[in-house]
Amino acid sequence: MAPKFVRSTIQKMAGYAPGEQPAPGTRIIKLNTNENPFPPSPKVMEAIAKVPGEHLRRYPDPMSRSFCAAAGKVLGFKPDWIITGNGSDDVLAFALLTFCAPGDVLAYPDPTYSLYPVLAGINDVSVKPVPWEDNWRLPIEGLLASGAKAIFLANPNAPTGTLVEPGVIGDLASRFDGAVLVDEAYADFAEANCLELVRRHENVIVCRTLSKAYSLAGLRFGFAVAQPQVIAEMNKVKDSYPCDAISIAAATAAIEDQEYARKTWEHVKAQRSRLADELTKMGWQVIPSHTNFLFAMPPGGRGKECYEFLKSRGVLVRHFDKPGQRDKVRISIGTTEENDVLLKLLREWK
Ligand SMILES: Cc1ncc(COP(=O)(O)O)c(C=O)c1O
């Protein structure tokens, strides 16, 4: 029983259910939460080792200026177009607080990242999930008719891995008065992204993470890009020191080492094609992916059985027990060797 002094909305809601995280050191092939299969850049480890004790004694830079300068250089924005957070989940949380008041509506295409309704629920914001149209086309009219104050749009989407063309999102933004937050957690594995829209549309906010493309899920570092007057408002809402001194140093080194990161993206994309081809040959239905994972239906729609079989053999994938999703599994792209094991097991699976 929840204590009576807890807000009733919190008592009634279910919290976010993260993917399984086995204890560090557990012998398992972990393909369930879309981490990058490669370690972070060696430059990241050097930067962490070099953080002086003095930087831990003092509070960290509240604005992560070294990171914003480095990311701005890589992405082509001035530092005041960037704000950082403790993972992109944190950025999504303070973005929601910036754009929606209790009682407002948050809309998003459905299915999508299951954190959005949780963040809304915590803040007494109602949600309007709008089903994707055929072939994962953006339900623009439904989103516009939702009465929403903000639209959250994962692009590429999770768990489907599908991509909406930036031009379509630009059209949505120009017809909508509220904020359009484009969650680009997986954009580095895609051929297109919405960064250019930010220059033209004051109401477009692009959110990124270092968890996937930069192999730093354990560090917790995310950021958003938007026009400076929007960033200034989000700044009032974020935690005073959302990123610690070590994470700022590490994230700065990671984004500066584009050469290393890009090699990992190329590997992931090549292995993504290989896995998709092999699974298709085995009779799976694979949704074409623009991310570092595949969302796919095994023969007979036996998603749960597949998840359980793989788990019993030491390979963790993700299964969502939800309508329209329980017949599939979501498989993060691993190293070549991990994918070899996965394919061998799936060939044996009866
Ligand atoms: C669409 C989407 N957005 C955001 C995140 C969270 O990223 P972070 O680790 O930066 O909080 C995830 C993680 O799985 C995701 O799938």
Image (tube, rainbow, N blue to C red):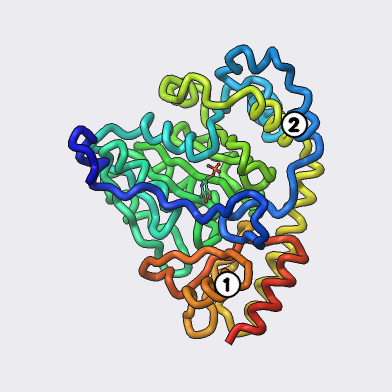
**Lower position in the chain sequence, tag 1 or tag 2:** 2
* Image vertical order of residue 316 relative to residue 77, above or below: below
Q: Is residue 235 left or right of residue 81?
A: left
Q: Which mark is residue 253?
A: 2
* Image vertical order of residue 348 relative to residue 239, above or below: below
Which element type, helix, strand or loop, lies under badge 2?
Answer: helix
Across and down, in percent, residue 71 comes to 67, 31
Q: Which mark is residue 312?
A: 1
Q: What is the CA distance from the residue labelled 1 to the residue labelled 2?
A: 38 Å
Quadrant assignment, res 87: top right
Across and down, in percent, residue 12 comes to 23, 47
The answer to whether any part of residue 51 appears in the image is: yes
Which element type, helix, strand or loop, lies under badge 1?
Answer: helix
Check disc 1 and give the amino acid type.
Ser
Q: Which mark is residue 142?
A: none
Question: Which residue does the image show at 59% across and 51% down from the upper left?
Answer: 23
* Image vertical order of residue 83 relative to residue 10, above or below: above
Q: Nearer the viewer, residue 348 or 279?
A: 348
- For the C terminus, the image quarter is bottom right
Q: Is mark 1 within 8 Å of ligand 1?
A: no
Across and down, in percent, residue 242 comes to 52, 26
Residue count near mark 1 (Cα–Cα under 10 Å), binned few <14, some 14–19, many ≥20: few
Quadrant assignment, res 277: bottom right
Question: Which residue does the image show at 73% across and 36% down from the upper left?
Answer: 254
Check disc 2 and give the amino acid type.
Ala
Outermost residue toward the bottom?
Answer: 350
Quadrant assignment, res 7: top left
